[in-house]
């Protein structure tokens, strides 16, 4: 089981070291990939000009642009809601950047009350993400939101 208290403290340390969002989010993506078992992609998409654009990540090359309302990331961002998808192949309109992905967790990021992007985690294992993972990773995103003084 993942120690989310420790993970939040580690993210805080990364943010204290560098508040500019690009290296902060890049190191956070790497930390998540190293800490959480059974991931094949961990990273961010940031809202820009009405669509999500690929941000810092760890994993295989990914889709660069995702329209709002499309795929798991675009749907989460458009609806400002967390999406925990047990089987991405059953998700209407799923965008398959990596055919090995089987499940996904997407959590919107906010700045001054509006969505600015999403944290996206993919797993090659179906039904990988639990309610405990969702709660712990919400705490991680809240830490990012609080500490990122240079976010878009």
Image (spheres, rainbow, N blue to C red):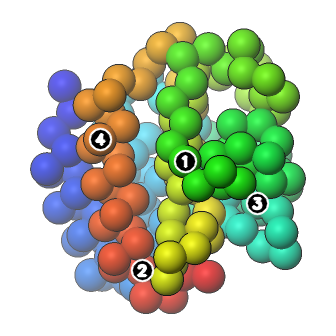
Gap in angstroms between the C-alphas marked 1 and 2: 20 Å
Q: Which mark is residue 52?
A: 3
Give how far across and how far down residue 3 sits, in percent: 16, 39
Instruction: Quickly name the residue at label 4.
Output: 135
Q: Earlier in the sequence, mark 3 or mark 2?
A: 3
- 25 or 118, nearer to the observer: 118
Which residue is painted at 53% across and 11% down in the image? 126
The reply to whether dot 1 and dot 2 touch (C-beta < 8 Å) is no
> Would residue 140 be seen by someone viewing this image from the given angle?
yes
The reply to whether dot 2 and dot 4 touch (C-beta < 8 Å) is no
Disc 3 vs disc 4: which is toward the camera? 4
Measured along the vertical axis of the image, is residue 51 above or below residue 100? below
Q: Earlier in the sequence, mark 4 or mark 1?
A: 1
Horizontal arrangement in the rendering, residue 81 relative to residue 49 (left or right):
left
- Helix, strand or loop for disc 1: loop
- 39 or 106, nearer to the observer: 106
Which residue is painted at 34% across and 79% down in the image? 147
Q: Earlier in the sequence, mark 2 or mark 4?
A: 4
Gap in angstroms between the C-alphas marked 4 and 1: 13 Å
Give how far across and how far down residue 102 sits, in percent: 62, 16
The residue carrying pointer 2 sits among few (fewer than 14), some (14 to 19) or many (20 or more) residues within 10 Å by Cα, namely: many
Gap in angstroms between the C-alphas marked 3 and 4: 23 Å
Measured along the vertical axis of the image, is residue 90 above or below residue 5? above
Toward which corner of the image does residue 144 lie, by quadrant? bottom left
Q: Quadrant of the N terminus?
A: top left
The residue carrying pointer 4 sits among few (fewer than 14), some (14 to 19) or many (20 or more) residues within 10 Å by Cα, namely: few
The reply to whether dot 1 and dot 3 touch (C-beta < 8 Å) is no
Instruction: Quickly name the residue at label 2.
Output: 148
Q: Which mark is residue 81?
A: 1
- Helix, strand or loop for disc 3: strand
Disc 2 vs disc 4: which is toward the camera? 4
Which residue is painted at 67% across and 20% down in the image? 88
């Amino acid at each position: 089981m993942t120690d989310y208290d420790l993970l939040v403290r580690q993210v805080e340390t990364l943010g204290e070291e560098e508040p500019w969002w690009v290296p902060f989010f890049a190191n956070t993506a790497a930390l998540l990939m190293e800490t959480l078992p059974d991931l094949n992609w961990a990273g961010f998409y940031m809202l820009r000009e009405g669509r999500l654009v690929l941000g810092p990540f760890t994993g295989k090359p990914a889709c660069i642009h995702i329209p709002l309302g499309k795929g798991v990331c675009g749907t989460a961002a458009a609806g400002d809601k967390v999406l925990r998808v047990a089987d991405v192949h059953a998700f209407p309109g799923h965008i398959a950047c990596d055919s090995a992905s089987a499940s996904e967790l997407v959590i919107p990021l906010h700045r001054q009350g509006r969505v600015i992007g999403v944290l996206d985690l993919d797993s090659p294992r179906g039904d990988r993400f639990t309610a405990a993972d969702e709660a712990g990773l919400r705490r991680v995103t809240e830490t990012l939101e609080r500490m990122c003084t240079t976010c878009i």
